[in-house]
Image: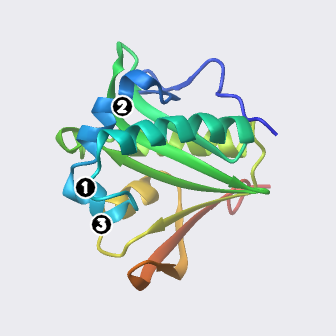
Amino acid sequence: MPLAPPDPPLSDGVILLRPWVHADIDQLRDACQDRSIQCYIPIPRPYHRADAEGYVARTRRQWEEGSKAAFAIVDPAEPGVVLGAVTLALAGGTGQIAYWVVPALRRAGLATRALRLVADWAVGPLGLGVLLLEIHPSNTASIAVAERGGFHLAGHLDVNDTTGERDHLLFSRLAVQEGAA
């Protein structure tokens, strides 16, 4: 079932989340040259313009299929400037979120803001029951974002990929938070 981008777009006045567009391709390619993004996000290395073109096209299909909501994080005053990314992959009543921010803007709270906006949309209008984050234990900045975003450590998860087994921390947020009636 198709998934429509939120209307109005998700925003807290400091950031705005919008679907990726063709004009973002060069900024996406440039951001994905960052070693931290390459270390923690499974992307091609090196990351070429064709990879960015393919990603933007794929995100459009994923919206139409209802399998993933992929957003560019932008400044509402300059919506053509990409500050980062946040995605929500959907599987039944569960969503898995991932995020990154361009190196020059890290530690400014943008990832936390984006995580909160997407998580609230996912458990609100989308009606998802459980949200998950997979974070490498050495990614302390992402762990801090998860905690500030209302996620709680749920355990460890072994993930198979082309390099073999690797350990990830699993963070979760339930639609109904603990202690809520």
> In front: mark 2 or mark 3?
2
Q: Secondary structure at mark 2?
A: helix
Quadrant (top left, top right, bottom left, bottom right) of the N terminus: top right
Horizontal relation, residue 37 to residue 23: left or right? left
164 or 131, which is in the foreground? Answer: 164
Coloration mode:
rainbow
The answer for how far apart the CA atoms under marks 1 and 3 are is 24 Å
Q: Amino acid at mark 3?
A: Thr
Residues at circles 2 and 1 in contact by the CB criterion of under 8 Å: no
Q: Which residue is mark 1?
A: 46
Question: Which residue is farthest bottom?
Answer: 165
Q: Position of residue 124 (x, y in %)?
A: 72, 40
Task: Give the residue at x 45% y 77%.
Answer: 168
Horizontal relation, residue 76 to residue 60: left or right? left
Q: Position of residue 109 (x, y in %)?
A: 32, 41
The answer for how far apart the CA atoms under marks 2 and 3 are is 28 Å
Question: Which residue is farthest top?
Answer: 77
Work out whether 12 lies above or below 126.
above
**Which numbered disc flags the more N-terminal residue, 1 or 3?**
1
Task: Give the residue at x 80% y 55%.
Answer: 181
Crowd around label 2: few <14 · some 14–19 · many ≥20 (10 Å): many
Mark sitting on residue 25: 2
Q: Amino acid at mark 2?
A: Ile
Q: Secondary structure at mark 1?
A: loop
Q: Position of residue 37 (x, y in %)?
A: 29, 55
> In front: mark 1 or mark 3?
1
Task: Give the residue at x 35% y 57%.
Answer: 44
Q: Which residue is mark 3?
A: 140
Q: Secondary structure at mark 3?
A: helix
Task: Give the residue at x 35% y 76%.
Answer: 137
